[in-house]
């Protein structure tokens, strides 16, 4: 009987991990799937590369702002209804993108995608922390991250083949079908992990004050910006994927896997390592190692591109994978530390952290990446600077935490 119960618990654990990973995939799918369609969208609407890049900016800005709302609302109303509502809105927005007759309409529905796409990623972290603590929470978050990490690798490959076969409109049609399948799956299997007796009343003023108290927390803000900057060390290359793959590596629209497989390889390997390190290393030790690896990888990439005009593709891919490994290794411990700073408002803390990270990513996608995408050296330099800023801010956060203890 005990063995049967244990088997059931393990099955539920894996089902929950798979579901949370799937609903977290919505956001990267909405970014990466239509990368292969960039040139076609520009040609159809007569746009510059910079203008098409704004389909990412108008998506990520509302994604960032809504992350401040979704977590606190899930604290007050429960995790399940917020996730289901967000997925329904996302599905309808994807249908709108599919049939967009002009670029303005496409931007409007892309913004609506941004309003809703982050709900699984944001509220999902609170679900994990509702159910588990300490090393168990870190292991599940690492497992979800590992499963979720397949999205950026698979999305542009799927998008490339759909684009080549059916055109760019069908790529957004795929997003709509993906969203619909998640609505059904979440409705049938997602549990409510935040009971009514623990929910605060939904009061806008209280939610705003809670969010403001989180933003004002010195250690939290330093950690959030440090995490976002460290992630930007990897996003420097991902945001410029059309330029990296097509212009600099001279590959085709169905070959985006050459960039995203190394990225995902680094993320998945780090997620596995993080799960093994849970309980054996302190949060600070693992975070420091992740920052140092990301900084080292970006430094080597910068030096390589500065010394060699066209470095071997495999060497560039290896360096990008190394940067991804370092970025991901620091991620779970930083997230859990920030959530633990506000145990009674984890949804709000997750929202503020996501808002900061997404805002930094929006800056990279919409402004920094188009400027740096002219050469691999410029992208590598941007990556190195981001990793350096992230490490420096993390060090300041450690000093801040130590001062509070004394």
Image (cartoon, helix red, strand yellow):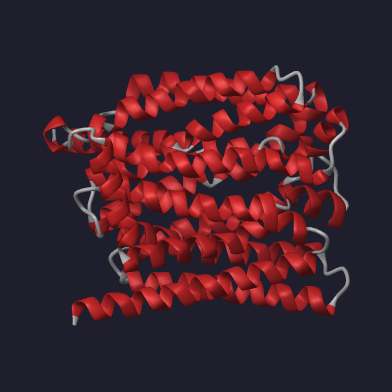
Q: Position of residue 394 (x, y in %)?
A: 42, 73
Give the farthest residue toward the left: 197
Residue 190 can be seen in this image: no
State whether residue 55 is above or below residue 287: above
Residue shown at 57%/42% (left/top)? Answer: 60
In which image quadrant can residue 287 be found? bottom left
Question: In the picture, which quadrant includes the N terminus?
Answer: top left
State whether residue 312 is above or below residue 292: above
Residue 301 can be seen in this image: yes
Q: Position of residue 209 (x, y in %)?
A: 26, 48
Residue shown at 79%/73% (left/top)? Answer: 305
In which image quadrant can residue 44 be found? top right
In which image quadrant can residue 371 be found? bottom right
Say how many tags the image has: 0
Q: Nearer the viewer, residue 225 or 179?
A: 225
Question: On the picture, is 264 further left or further right than 290?
Answer: right
State whether residue 94 is above or below residue 148: above
Q: Position of residue 81 (x, y in %)?
A: 32, 25
Residue shown at 80%/24% (left/top)? Answer: 167
Q: Position of residue 311 (x, y in %)?
A: 83, 69
Question: In the picture, which quadrant includes the C terminus?
Answer: bottom left
Residue shown at 60%/66% (left/top)? Answer: 323
Question: On the picture, is 245 further left or further right than 111?
Answer: right
């Amino acid at each position: 009987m005990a063995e049967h119960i244990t088997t059931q618990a393990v099955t539920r654990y894996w089902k929950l991990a798979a579901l949370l990973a799937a609903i977290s995939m919505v956001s990267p799918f909405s970014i990466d799937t239509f990368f292969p369609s960039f040139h076609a969208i520009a040609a159809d609407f007569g746009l510059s590369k910079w203008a098409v890049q704004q389909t990412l900016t108008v998506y990520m800005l509302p994604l960032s702002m809504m992350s401040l709302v979704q977590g606190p609302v899930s604290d007050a109303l429960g995790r399940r209804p917020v996730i289901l509502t967000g997925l329904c809105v996302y599905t309808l927005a994807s249908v709108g993108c599919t049939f967009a007759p002009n670029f303005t309409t496409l931007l409007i529905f892309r913004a609506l995608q941004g309003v809703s796409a982050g709900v699984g990623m944001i509220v999902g972290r609170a679900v994990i922390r509702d159910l588990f603590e300490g090393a168990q929470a870190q292991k599940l978050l690492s497992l979800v991250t590992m499963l979720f990490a397949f999205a950026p690798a698979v999305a542009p490959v799927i998008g490339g083949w759909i684009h080549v076969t059916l055109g760019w409109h069908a790529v957004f049609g795929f997003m709509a079908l993906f969203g619909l399948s998640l609505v059904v799956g979440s409705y049938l299997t997602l549990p409510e992990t935040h009971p009514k007796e623990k929910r605060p009343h939904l009061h806008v003023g209280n939610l705003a004050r809670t969010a403001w108290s989180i933003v004002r927390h010195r250690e939290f803000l330093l950690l959030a910006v440090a995490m976002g900057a460290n992630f930007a060390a990897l996003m420097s290359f991902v945001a410029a994927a059309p330029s990296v793959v097509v212009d600099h590596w001279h590959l085709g629209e169905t070959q985006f896997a050459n960039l995203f497989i190394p990225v995902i390889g680094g993320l998945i390997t780090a997620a596995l390592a993080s799960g093994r390190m849970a309980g054996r290393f302190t949060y600070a030790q693992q975070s420091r190692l992740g920052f140092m690896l990301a900084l080292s990888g970006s430094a080597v990439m910068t030096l390589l591109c500065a010394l060699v005009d066209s470095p071997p593709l495999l060497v560039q891919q290896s360096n990008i994978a190394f940067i991804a490994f370092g970025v991901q290794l620091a991620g779970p411990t930083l997230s859990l530390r920030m959530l633990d700073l506000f145990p009674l408002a984890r949804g709000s803390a997750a929202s503020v952290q996501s808002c900061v990270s997404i805002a930094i990513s929006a800056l990279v996608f919409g402004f920094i990446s188009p400027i740096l995408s002219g050469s691999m050296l410029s992208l590598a330099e941007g990556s190195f600077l981001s990793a350096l800023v992230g490490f420096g801010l993390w060090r300041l956060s450690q000093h801040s935490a130590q001062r509070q203890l004394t």
